Image (spheres, rainbow, N blue to C red):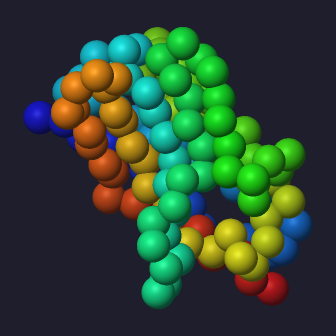
Amino acid sequence: QVQLVESGGGLVQPGGSLRLSCAASGITFSIYNMGWYRQAPGKQRELVAVITRDGSTNYADFVKGRFTISRDNAKNTVYLQMNGLKPEDTAVYYCNARRPYSRNDYWGQGTQVTVSS
């Protein structure tokens, strides 16, 4: 059974920082590309950042220079370090695991991030 469990969300003031974690189980973590997506109320889910199984990273323009994605294959965990948070970053953040060249595509349950003073 595949599980992706996010943690680290919460309420933070503008300019603050949060670190999201996503612990994976039931998959061979090292062969999956891992991503963070977010969905704000009334909006579609959008890509935030991806880290490939080889360690390459890609970011949405709206988070470049503020967010950093990383992974620890020994811990089966992917992280999203979020600095310089803005109110428009408020959303539910979802972890995604996607195995290249397959239909294996899994999602976590999401963690709420609220940026407000």
Q: Residue at x 56, y 37 (%)?
A: 50
Indicate left or right for 70 with 62 as reference. left
Q: Position of residue 59 (x, y in %)?
A: 68, 43
**Whole-percent x, y for residue 69 in the image:** 65, 36
Residue 25 against residue 110 in the figure, above or below = above
Residue 76, percent from left and from top = 41, 23
- Residue 33 seen anywhere in this rendered image of the structure: yes
Q: Nearer the viewer, residue 29 or 44?
A: 44
Q: What residue sits 60% from the left and 44% below the top?
A: 49
The answer to which of 117 and 52 lies nearer the viewer is 52
52 displayed left or right of 108: right
Q: Quadrant of the N terminus?
A: top left
Up/down of 14 relative to 33, above or below = below
Q: Quadrant of residue 89?
A: bottom right
User: Which residue appears at 52% of the width and 23% of the height?
Assistant: 52
Q: Which quadrant of the figure has residue 105?
A: top left
Number of labelled discs?
0
Q: Position of residue 26 (x, y in %)?
A: 20, 27
Residue at 55 percent across and 72 percent down: it is 91
Task: Choose top left, top right, bottom left or bottom right for residue 13.
Answer: bottom right
Task: Please identify the quadrant where the C terminus is shown.
Answer: bottom right
Q: Is residue 19 visible?
A: no
> For the view shown, which residue lies furthest in the front direction?
101
